[in-house]
Amino acid sequence: MTSFDLTGKLAVVTGARRGIGRAMARALAAAGADIIGVSVGLEESGSAVEKDVQAAGRGFEAIRTDFADPEAVRALGADLAGRGRPIDILVNNAGTIRRTPAAQHTDADWELVLQVNLTAQFALTRAVGATMVDRGRGKVIFTASLLSFQGGITVPGYTAAKHGIAGLTKALANEWAPHGVNVNALAPGYIATDNTRALRDDPDRSTAILDRIPAGRWGDPDDLAGAAVFLASDAAAYLHGVVLPVDGGWLGR
């Protein structure tokens, strides 16, 4: 369907080096979008995500940015907002996690996770989103989480940040929907990435998690591909402020 066609669009994907970000960048490129990949450790050339995008026949640019550094994030926002070719799609996927019981959760871990997972997301979206509002069109996609709905265990900073992402998604949608900008979020379930390796390596936790997932398996990053393309496309023109779970049925249990 042409409503899912992203030909000629320019998408920024943060946290694009691996996992969910890489999968979403690959999917958007397959749908026709050129990609600016952003990550703290992204290679200047020759990265796996760059090869994915180029294999789809689309252009790729790598930008290395540390989302733990507020000044670096503001500089990235100014760079992207000031370009001659405007950003059509912004995928806010960069993130980090610290697993420590709440009573031992340090201020440093709390502040790092909130900065990377929430504050940086707002700062970047404020800069790029302002240009979308001015143009009267654009798509913003946040990566939320099941912990945008639930409390989790030993991840108080991450849970607070992801609840914040759900609220930010709705707040920005309320303001920007009248200006033709769609702001939505994906909430991945338990996906087999580096962030969940500790859970998958724990036999008891892994078994408990799998027992609750109706689909009966851990998710794969590519399970987010179709939903990402949908939210980035004209097919989702009337979706605003949605936090869409892609979780194998976890929240339905």
Image (cartoon, helix red, strand yellow):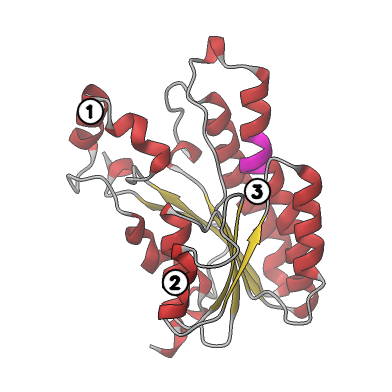
Tag 3: amino acid: Leu
Q: Is residue 24 visible?
A: yes
74 left or right of 232 in image:
right
Q: Which residue is mark 3?
A: 168
Quadrant location, the C terminus: top left
Q: Tell me, for residue 208, which label it has, or none.
A: 1
Secondary structure mainly formed by the magenta segment: helix
Q: Which marked residue is nearer to the observer: mark 3 or mark 1?
A: 1
135 left or right of 192 in image:
right
Q: Tell me, for residue 51, which label it has, or none.
A: 2
Outermost residue, top direction? 103
Residue 41, given in percent of the width and then of the height, sits at: 58, 50
Residue 51, given in percent of the width and then of the height, sits at: 44, 72
Tag 2: amino acid: Lys
Residue 231, given in percent of the width and then of the height, sits at: 49, 68
Q: Earlier in the sequence, mark 2 or mark 1?
A: 2
Name the residue nearer the viewer: 68 or 149: 68
Q: Earlier in the sequence, mark 3 or mark 2?
A: 2
Tag 1: amino acid: Ala
Q: Which marked residue is nearer to the observer: mark 2 or mark 1?
A: 2
What segment carries the magenta color?
Answer: 114-118
What is the crowding at mark 1: few (fewer than 14 residues within 10 Å), some, or many (at least 20)? few
Q: Magenta segment: does it hold 111? A: no
The CA span between labels 3 and 2 is 33 Å
Quadrant location, the N terminus: bottom left
**What residue appears at the point 61 percent right and 25 percent down from the top-left corner?**
109
